Image (cartoon, helix red, strand yellow):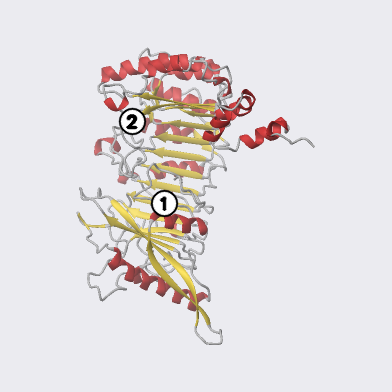
Amino acid sequence: MPRLELLDMPLEVVTNIFQWLPGKDQKNLALTCSAVLNIVAPTLYRTARLFYAEPGKDVKFDGLPRLADISHLISSPQFPLGYTKSLSIKRKRGHDSSAPNPKRRQWVYGRDKKEQMEFTETADKAIGLILNRFNEGQLESIRLDHQTTYNTFKLICERQKKIRSLDLGEFRPGGNRCKIPNQILIPGSLALESLEICEIDERVTCLVTFIKILHQNSPTLKRLRIGDQTHPQKPRLTASAWARRPRSKTNLPFSRIDFPALEQISIIHDHSAERFWDMFQDIAYCGSKLSHVRISCFTDPYVLIQRLVSKGADGIKSIQTNNCRRRNHAAFQSPVHNQLPRIKSLETLQMQVCTHEEGEFQAAYLGRTTIKRLWLQCSANCDPKKCRSMAGLLDYATNTSLSSDKWPVLEELAIGAPQWKKSESDLAGGWLELPMLRSLKILRLLQWQTGTQQQKNQQTVELLLPRVENYVNLIYCWSMVAYGKLPNLRIIVVDTETGQGCPGTAIFRPLYFVVYPIDEFVDADGTGLTVSPLVFSENYETALKVCKEINCSSYLLQFGPPAPEGFWDDQYSPDL
């Protein structure tokens, strides 16, 4: 019987095998013969990523082409673009945007206004040539990391009608001030499922155009993100930005936009688009599929949430707010908990560095039998025992306390650290104030401030480990006595200060303590089996492995507040 060669198998079998190989292995296979090249080409060249240098004379980018030259490079026959489904054009920045505390210029792509305008016009022409290299309806995804002008968007609408995911970068009219014809923005002419944009220009022409883009894709849109995910860890709102009076509304040819398929809304650091959000929350009607709302560094987030819920989006499972402010405290005649309705399906609630008054959120804490993930931290970053927003959560005499009967499925919790005692003999001091939750799997203890000074805790592993051990032993004994079952606690994360700065700007590095339940036999005959917990200080990688074992997300393990901002889901996510 002759030996069966690899290429003797049916073509669909070989194709299915090759498509699961890493890109590097597919590239090596493509070099063997033309037959293999034809098999792997559709997956090997499915994505085209182009990197270009920033304008200027930075020696770090001497090896990168300018955007105007990229179109000539891709015209070479060695780039088989006929298989490409996804196009990405990005700037090569001079820093690692994934670093814990990235330092970058926000919203600025040129050294001055003149250079920025010249760069936009050059990019407009170059991108037009690049997009013309693809067949009509070929691309499914386009991601642009620079200013997108009307000309660029017009070309995408005309030639790539099958596109499903679009990242416009920074959407601006452009130097020639051209307008997009109304027939291009007819609802249904595009069927986007994901739309992302870094910043919205507040000029009327750009604002109305973007509203029309939303209206055009409203039947199919599933994901909407506005804002830059690479913003610094602690963005701040200046008084002129969030206290500004709203501008007059812009007239639109329609008074309502329905989003029946929308699942996620993410707003990051876009407090300057005040006019847009005033319009959006008045005309947007989201259906029952809206499940995730992520708002960071935004003005009046609870008004937006309230209006979304009141218009049909009452099935939200995740609400995350960070660095949010109110425009005018006196404008609210009802407590803020009415702005954050009691959504029965809510599983994730994150209120981090948000402004509120005493007792406003107490009703929002009632009846939370579905909450799995909870992150609480006020804008004053104060002692959680005295915090106005968290009053009663650590007091077991109240009906909102963090107890197992009121929060039966809570698995991941981030809350202020207890008041450490300076005396080494009082190892349990402060830890008795922590919640006793049998369902809790991961506990993160956040640093907080007293007045204008950062609380100076004894933050070494040697001093923290005995306190963690005492708390773990306490919760194990309590759970066995109260429920006859072991608790689920496996990971405790304690923030420690590693950098100095202005109040609220210190850099925190977490310490990880992992709990290992160990079986022990009390009697010689093997009866009286008991379990004693052992606590060890571990590194980040070990904590990630344990996190995966207990089927939790890695959100609470990150260095400082998660950046870039991401959704806090119920699955392990190492690339968050």
- Res 281 quadrant in image: top left
Q: Which residue is drawn at 28% across and 18% down?
A: 115
Residue pointed to by mark 1:
350
Q: Where is residue 196 shown, x and y percent of the image?
A: 46, 32
Residue pointed to by mark 2:
93
The front one of 37 and 474 is 37
Q: Which residue is drawn at 39% across and 66% down?
A: 536
Residue 536 higher or lower than 57, as above or below: below
Counting labels gives 2
Q: Is the N terminus in the top left, top right, bottom left or bottom right quadrant?
A: top right
- Work out whether residue 310 can be spotted: yes
Residue type, numbered disc 2: Arg
Which of disc 1 and disc 2 is earlier in sequence? 2
Secondary structure state at the residue bearing disc 2: loop
Q: Where is residue 250 shown, x and y percent of the image?
A: 40, 25
Q: With 158 as the anchor, is 118 left or right in this view?
A: left
